[in-house]
């Protein structure tokens, strides 16, 4: 059994570890992208006009209401053509390669962003409006109000929710295995197929995912404690 | 902090520079990207280092040399392999894909470069093997009364049974069109179909002969998988295995057709075939 | 975009709705029962029981559902001992493997919601009920359960929707629910977009209806928040 997990050309140990790193890379990039989408979505929902608000609403409803697998499939087969369609509008007809990593990150990021939108929106709304008024009364500029009052508190309120979104994002990366990107799930599937030992490889994959989730849970707990250090406990 | 930022920036700049330098070199020769499944030995598969191997990997290298292109072979799941071609994820498909009318409606083919009959298999001790169906070849392009009898016999044998096929394959078509009353279970990969046959979830599988032999050889657990019944070919099973490509790429199709013809004539395909299959699958 | 393919796909995909709903319904039913047990263990005074429950929740919340499905379907089927056991009658069917995987998954999340709901009940209210001579069962039925349900319902609504979406992964083990049928249609027509867009719309509709139902349920259990007529 152990020789199946060996390092190098005879075993699958190195493939699985590389897959884990790839999973981590996709998850981190998707989560970061998700924060961009989430911030845009939240500000559209809170401050946008009727059109941007509707767009943000459609975005979160559709992406959160359709199975992740479908979102990934649609983007996987769609982005290439869409990007080339846009490029051809500008007169470029050559081939533009969009690799599996980019598409995977984009699709998981889109999903991550839809959930983040709600978390960030809730967190912004949790900041008492009186504080912003107070800031204005003291003559603070908009940027200063944003950086001194809104952001630090939004971050604190959003952290627990974002921790959940991160876990979701991390686990959703397993679905990119359908795009043949060599992340953890894909490596486990290939190894299980070649060696005919699915139990071993899926169990190892499960353990590796658990390692990733426990480390990140710990990190988010620390971050939460850090951000709450000035808050009196009831 | 600033140091890290600086080094990241430097790294990105280097990377950008590298890709700019590399780009013109790649354009000198046509670059062709080929998709294969990587889970269909001996046609195509993966070794323990995660590298693609198999008959089609070697053949693709040979054909690319002949058409003067640089090739890159990549893995793509079978059920998305045609949509992936259409959305330009790659330019060619070499994945044991038979040339059928259904597929020709959406893509075109170069070749065929090989052919393999379709057979059923069950586990040793299965009542299906006890039927002792004749193992003659059945060419379904023109079905003689004798051959029709063989098809009917096979259909009667698997009627009411659960039969595993790989999704979107000629074998799925064959069972669904010619063998009514079969509970078809469609799998994403041949490997998974094999796992379920061995575990007893399904009564039989049907696939291309070499893929079944690949399964039998793949591991100790699979040694009891046994082929049975006639070896079917042509008709609903198509006209042999070819290279799939987009309909617009007629120039590439012409070049590949010629390369395949030459490689067949000079025995290259026979050589590669004997190496991977143990016998000659080339088109005579 | 080919509209006629989309139109043809609608009835075929709708035929998968009952399977999807069955999978989700059974998983939620069994999952809730299991979750109640796990939450009880988690809240029990026994360290051992609490640890076991916590471990279960940790494992099933910390790994992707896809891994769990494959582990249960292909992983367990690999062992002769499993195949010889009485469980094989259930485990050999992809349908039940799907139900089991979804059940185990949702139970892990639901147990935490139940725990949160029960813990949200102010202790004073329980004490007050006891002082009034309520039996343990009556305390649970009249005090703990209503408050806990009210507290946990919005989160549970989300969980139902997540389950509907998660059921699409059952297509990876040959089940022909909505996504499975979609993949099968695509394998014949190769029209990825058309078919997946229709499938997506069906999921969206199901989830919209569920959201409405949950809203209604929330309204029902919070009469105290309504403005007097």
Image (spheres, helix red, strand yellow):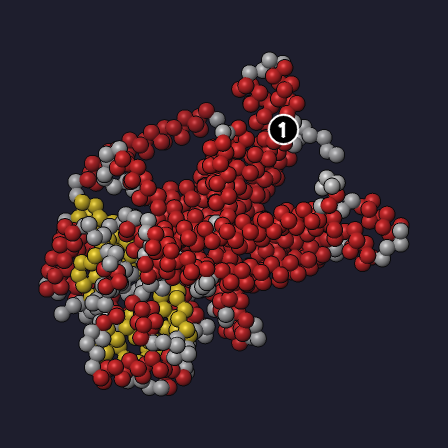
User: Would you call the spot at circle 1 few (<14 residues within 10 Å), some (14-19), or many (20 or more)?
Assistant: some
Say which quarter of the image contains residue B224.
bottom left
Tag 1, which secondary structure? loop
Where does label 1 land, which residue? A127
Is A42 situated above or below B2? below
> Extreme front residue here?
C229
Say which quarter of the image contains residue B134.
bottom left
Horizontal side, residue C30 vs residue A199: left or right? right
Residue at screen point 32% across, 72% down: B177
- Of residue C21 and residue A171, the one placed in the foreground of this image is C21
Query: How many numbered circles does the render carry?
Result: 1
Residue at screen point 46% across, 36% down: A55
Say which quarter of the image contains residue C122.
top right
- Of residue A119 and residue A64, the one placed in the foreground of this image is A64
Residue at screen point 21% across, 53% down: B247
Picture coordinates of residue A234 (x, y %)? Answer: 75, 34
Q: Quadrant of the C terminus of chain C?
A: top right
Is A190 situated above or below C128? below
Residue at screen point 59% across, 35% down: A122
Picture coordinates of residue C160 (x, y %)? Answer: 58, 53
- Of residue B163 and residue B129, the one placed in the foreground of this image is B163
Horizontal side, residue B267 vs residue A44: left or right? left
Horizontal side, residue B67 vs residue A51: left or right? left
């Amino acid at each position: 059994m152990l020789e199946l997990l060996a390092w190098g050309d005879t075993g699958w140990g190195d493939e699985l570890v590389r897959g884990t790193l790839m999973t981590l890379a996709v998850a981190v990039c998707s989560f970061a992208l998700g924060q961009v989408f989430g911030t845009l979505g939240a500000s559209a929902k809170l401050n946008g006009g009727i059109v941007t608000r509707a767009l943000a609403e459609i975005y979160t409803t559709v992406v959160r209401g359709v199975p992740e697998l479908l979102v990934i499939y649609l983007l996987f087969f769609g982005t290439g053509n869409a990007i080339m369609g846009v490029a051809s509008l500008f007169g470029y007809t050559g081939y533009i390669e969009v690799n599996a990593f980019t598409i995977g990150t984009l699709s998981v990021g889109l999903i991550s962003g839809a959930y983040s939108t709600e978390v960030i929106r809730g967190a912004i709304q949790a900041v008492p409006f009186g504080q912003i008024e107070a800031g204005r009364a003291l003559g603070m500029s908009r940027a200063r109000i944003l950086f001194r009052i809104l952001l630090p508190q939004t971050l604190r309120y959003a952290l627990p929710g974002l921790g959940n979104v991160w876990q979701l994002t991390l686990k959703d990366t397993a679905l990119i295995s359908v795009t043949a990107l060599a992340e953890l799930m894909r490596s486990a599937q290939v190894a299980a197929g070649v060696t005919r030992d699915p139990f071993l490889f899926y169990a190892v994959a499960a353990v590796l995912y658990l390692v990733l989730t426990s480390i990140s849970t710990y990190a988010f707990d620390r971050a939460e404690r850090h951000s709450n250090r000035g808050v009196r406990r009831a | 902090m600033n140091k890290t930022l600086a080094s990241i920036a430097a790294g990105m700049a280097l990377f950008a520079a590298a890709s700019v330098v590399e780009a013109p070199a790649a354009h000198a020769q046509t670059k062709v990207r080929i998709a294969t499944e990587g889970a269909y030995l001996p046609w195509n598969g993966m070794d323990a280092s995660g590298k693609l191997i198999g008959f089609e990997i070697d053949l693709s290298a040979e054909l690319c040399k002949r058409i003067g292109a640089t090739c890159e072979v990549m893995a793509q799941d079978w059920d998305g392999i045609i949509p992936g071609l259409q959305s330009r994820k790659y330019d060619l498909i070499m994945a044991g894909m038979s040339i059928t009318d259904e597929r020709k409606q959406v893509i075109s083919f170069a070749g065929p470069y090989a052919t393999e009959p379709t057979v059923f298999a069950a586990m040793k001790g299965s009542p299906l093997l006890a039927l002792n169906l004749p193992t003659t070849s059945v060419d379904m392009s023109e079905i003689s009364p004798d051959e029709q009898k063989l098809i009917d016999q096979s259909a009667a044998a698997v009627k009411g049974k659960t039969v595993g096929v790989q999704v979107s394959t000629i074998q799925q078509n064959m069972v669904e069109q010619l063998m009514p009353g079969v509970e078809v279970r469609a799998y994403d990969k041949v490997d998974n179909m094999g796992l379920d046959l061995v575990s007893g979830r399904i009564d039989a599988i049907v696939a291309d002969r070499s893929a079944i032999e690949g399964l039998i050889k793949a591991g100790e657990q699979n040694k009891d998988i046994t082929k049975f019944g006639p070896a079917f070919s042509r008709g609903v099973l198509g006209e042999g295995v070819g290279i799939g490509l987009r309909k617009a790429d007629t120039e590439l199709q012409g070049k590949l057709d010629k390369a395949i013809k030459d490689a067949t004539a000079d025995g290259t395909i026979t050589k590669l075939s004997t190496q991977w299959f143990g016998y000659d699958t080339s088109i005579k | 975009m080919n509209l006629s393919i989309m139109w043809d796909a609608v009835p075929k995909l709708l035929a998968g709705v009952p399977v999807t709903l069955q999978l989700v319904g059974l998983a939620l039913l069994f999952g809730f029962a299991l979750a109640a047990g796990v939450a009880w263990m988690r809240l029990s005074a026994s360290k051992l029981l609490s640890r076991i429950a916590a471990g279960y929740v940790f494992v099933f919340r910390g790994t992707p559902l896809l891994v769990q499905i494959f582990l249960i379907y292909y992983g367990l089927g690999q062992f002769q001992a499993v195949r010889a056991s009485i469980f094989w009658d259930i485990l050999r069917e992809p349908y039940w493997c799907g139900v089991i995987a979804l059940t185990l998954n949702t139970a892990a999340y639901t147990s935490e919601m139940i725990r949160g709901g029960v813990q949200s009940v102010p202790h004073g209210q329980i004490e007050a009920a006891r002082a009034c001579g309520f039996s343990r069962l009556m305390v649970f039925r009249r005090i703990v359960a209503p408050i806990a349900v009210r507290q946990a319902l919005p989160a549970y609504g989300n969980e139902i929707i997540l389950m509907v979406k998660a059921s699409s992964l059952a297509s990876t083990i040959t089940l022909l629910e909505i996504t499975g049928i979609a993949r099968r249609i695509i394998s014949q027509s190769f029209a990825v977009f058309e078919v997946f867009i229709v499938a997506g719309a069906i999921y969206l509709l199901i989830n919209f209806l569920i959201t409405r139902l949950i809203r209604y349920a929330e309204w029902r259990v919070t009469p105290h928040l309504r403005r007097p007529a």
